[in-house]
Image: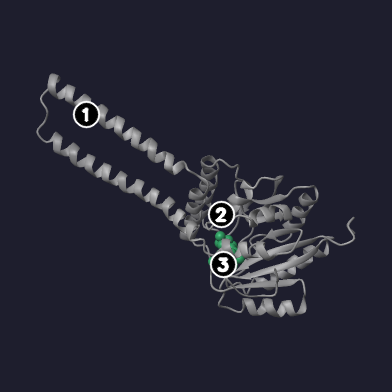
């Protein structure tokens, strides 16, 4: 028994989009894990616009097991916002965010809880290996996590996904953030507190197909960079400076060579001019594209729309 008269409660936050083959096994394995822990469990299943039987299963299970809560969002809002709704409404002393497809083994929760009891407020699960994912996705993920941690001012944990435990203090801190573009992995590092990691092997999906194809993962990566880093803006400045210095330098050099040393070839001018026009206009477009990314973010933030809408839930707040 705990020193407190009441057991502490841990919320297990599970966002899902069409995971009917996975949810029952996830529920079973989590329940097993909590049999061996002294903490109570609260499941918070978030239906992010599923069209299969997932929600029906959750409701049936909730009718049998009072620790099962669910939130049905009004449509598909995306993984990160689904997690956000669960974090807002969960009532545990700590919460664990876990994918529904059993890529994150529920047994790791026990290790996380050990760290939590040692006093850590954020416990990231770090993948020591990833099974069943394409080589390209693994390679890009490897590069991305390292690039991001170089580009940003906050110390981000490399190779951590969304599988993590958050103490109530960390949850409240994250819940107080109104940002529209929620890159939860970055925000969880940004808040500080005592943080630690546990290692695990990322399994292959139990069933179904990924809802994060490469293109969506790239969108997540871009979101992470523009949310947490001003580096792209600084790069524009460096690039512009370099370009100006180079063109002035080359101009002076050619002027000297062609005036004092040799006569210029007849076609040289047009060739260089054409190349220069292509290069500079390309560069301008690239820079405007980057600026546009940031402007779009400002636009999204000032609209101040709710992050998600709930159609139905058995949680109250
Ligand atoms: N998911 C979601 N909304 C979405 C996409 C995914 O709630 O729009 C859920 C999905 O059901 C799973 C988790 O988010 O529980 C991670 O998605 P997935 O396994 O497809 O991503 P991957 O592990 O392949 O990156
Ligand atoms: Mg997955």
Looking at the rendered structure, the secondary structure element under dot 2 is loop
Res 210 seen here = no
Task: Pick out the residue farthest to the top.
Answer: 260
Q: CA distance from mark 3 to mark 2?
A: 15 Å
Task: Tell me whether the residue at label 2 lies in contact with that at label 1, contact meaning CB atoms closer than 8 angstroms.
Answer: no
Residue bearing mark 2: 183
Q: CA distance from mark 2 to mark 1?
A: 46 Å
Label 2 beta carbon within 8 A of ligand 1: no
Q: Quadrant of ligand 1?
A: bottom right
Would you say 176 lies left or right of 233 here? right
Residue bearing mark 3: 308
Residue 209: % across, % down = 55, 68
Looking at the rendered structure, the secondary structure element under dot 1 is helix
Q: CA distance from mark 3 to mark 1?
A: 56 Å
- Number of other residues with Cα within 10 Å of mark 2, as a class: few under 14, some 14 to 19, many 20 or more: some
| Residue positioned 36% across, 50% down in the render | 289
Residue 262: % across, % down = 12, 22
Quarter assignment of residue 245: top left
Which numbered disc covers residue 68? Answer: none
Residue bearing mark 1: 251
Would you say 116 lies left or right of 258 here? right
């Amino acid at each position: 028994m705990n020193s407190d008269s009441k057991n502490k409660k841990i919320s297990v936050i599970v966002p899902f989009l069409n995971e009917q083959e996975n949810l029952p096994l996830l529920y079973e394995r989590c329940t097993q894990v909590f049999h061996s822990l002294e903490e109570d469990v609260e499941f918070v299943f978030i239906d992010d616009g599923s069209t299969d039987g997932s929600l029906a299963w959750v409701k049936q299970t909730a009718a049998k097991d009072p620790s099962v809560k669910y939130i049905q969002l009004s449509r598909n809002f995306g993984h990160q916002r689904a997690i956000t709704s669960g974090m807002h409404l969960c009532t545990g002393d700590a919460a664990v965010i876990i994918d529904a497809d059993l890529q994150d083994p529920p047994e790791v929760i026990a290790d996380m809880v050990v760290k939590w009891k040692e006093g850590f407020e954020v416990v990231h699960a770090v993948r020591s290996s990833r099974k069943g994912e394409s080589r390209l996705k693994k390679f890009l993920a490897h590069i991305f996590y390292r690039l991001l941690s170089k580009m940003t001012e906050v110390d981000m944990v490399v190779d951590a996904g969304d599988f993590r435990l958050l103490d109530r203090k960390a949850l409240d801190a994250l819940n107080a953030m109104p940002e529209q573009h929620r890159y939860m992995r970055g925000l969880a590092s940004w808040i500080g507190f005592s943080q630690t990691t546990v290692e695990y092997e990322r399994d292959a999906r139990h069933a179904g197909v990924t809802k994060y194809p490469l293109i969506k993962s790239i969108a997540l990566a871009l979101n992470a960079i523009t949310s947490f880093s001003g580096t792209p803006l600084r790069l524009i400045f460096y690039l512009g400076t370099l370009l100006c210095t180079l063109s002035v330098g080359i101009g002076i050099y050619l002027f000297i060579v062609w005036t004092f040393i040799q006569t210029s070839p007849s076609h040289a001018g047009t060739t260089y001019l054409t190349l220069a026009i292509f290069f500079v206009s390309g560069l301008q477009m690239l820079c405007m594209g980057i600026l546009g990314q940031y402007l779009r973010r400002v636009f999204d933030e000032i609209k101040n729309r709710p992050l998600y809408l709930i159609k139905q839930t058995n949680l109250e707040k």
